[in-house]
Image (cartoon, rainbow, N blue to C red):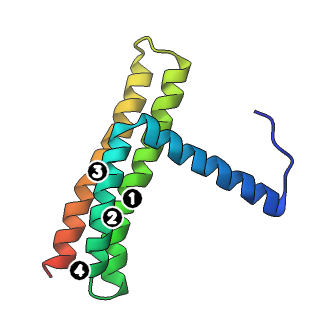
Amino acid sequence: MAKSGLRGIPRLTQAFVCSVQGLQSAWRNEEAFRLEVLAALLLIPAALWLGEGGVERVLLVGSVVLVLIVELLNSAVEAVVDRIGMEHNELSGRAKDIGSAAVLISLLLVPVVWALVLLS
C-alpha cells in the first residue's frame, strides 16, 4: 500500500478514519470483540462508581480496556495469517495460538485487578 503523502492534520484525520474503520470491522467480524465491548459497557461504569479515587478507577477501567486492545491486535494477527493462506501451517497456527493466549492473559488480569483493588 502506497503512503498517502499527507502530513499534519490531514494525516491525523486519515489515521482517525482508518482507526474507526478498524473498529467497525472488528465489531462486524469478531464475535469475541462484540462480547468484550458489551462487557466493557457494563464494567467501565461500575469501575467509575466503585473505584475510590483516580488511581483505582484507572486500574479498574484500564484492565477492561486492555482486553479490547489485545483482542483487536489478536484479530489483526488472525486476519493477516488468514490472508496468507487457509491451509494448515505450523507457524500460522503458532501465531494464532499466541495471540489467543495474549487475550486469555488480559482476560485473567481483569478479575485479579478488580479483586486487588476492591478487596483491599
- Examine the rendered structure and indicate whether residue 24 appears above or below residue 44: above
Choose between 59 and 36: the one closer to the eye: 36
Q: Which mark is residue 105?
A: 3
Please tell me which residue lies in front, 26 or 66.
26
Q: Is residue 29 above or below residue 15?
A: above
Q: Nearer the viewer, mark 1 or mark 4?
A: 4
Whichever of labels 4 and 2 marks the residue nearer the N terminus, that label is: 4
Q: Quadrant of residue 27?
A: top left
Q: For the residue labelled by badge 3, is the local secondary structure a helix, a strand or a loop?
A: helix
Residue at the extreme left: 119
Give 49 or 116, whichever is nearer the viewer.
49
User: Looking at the image, is 55 positioned above or below residue 92?
Assistant: below
Give the x, y percent position of residue 24. 52, 44
Q: CA distance from mark 1 to mark 4?
A: 19 Å
The label nearer to you, 4 versus 2, is 4
Above or below: residue 103 compared with residue 58: above
Name the kind of residue labelled 4 in the image: Leu
Q: Earlier in the sequence, mark 3 or mark 2?
A: 2
Q: Quadrant of the N terminus?
A: top right
Residue 102, visible in the rendered structure = no
Give coordinates of residue 55: x percent, y percent.
35, 83
Q: Which residue is mark 2?
A: 63
Q: Residue furthest bottom?
A: 53
Report if the CB atoms under discs 4 and 2 are less than 8 Å apart. no
Which residue shows up at 49% across the image and 22% down it? Answer: 82
Q: Amino acid at mark 1?
A: Leu
Q: Quickly name the residue at label 1.
A: 66
| Label annotation for residue 50 | 4
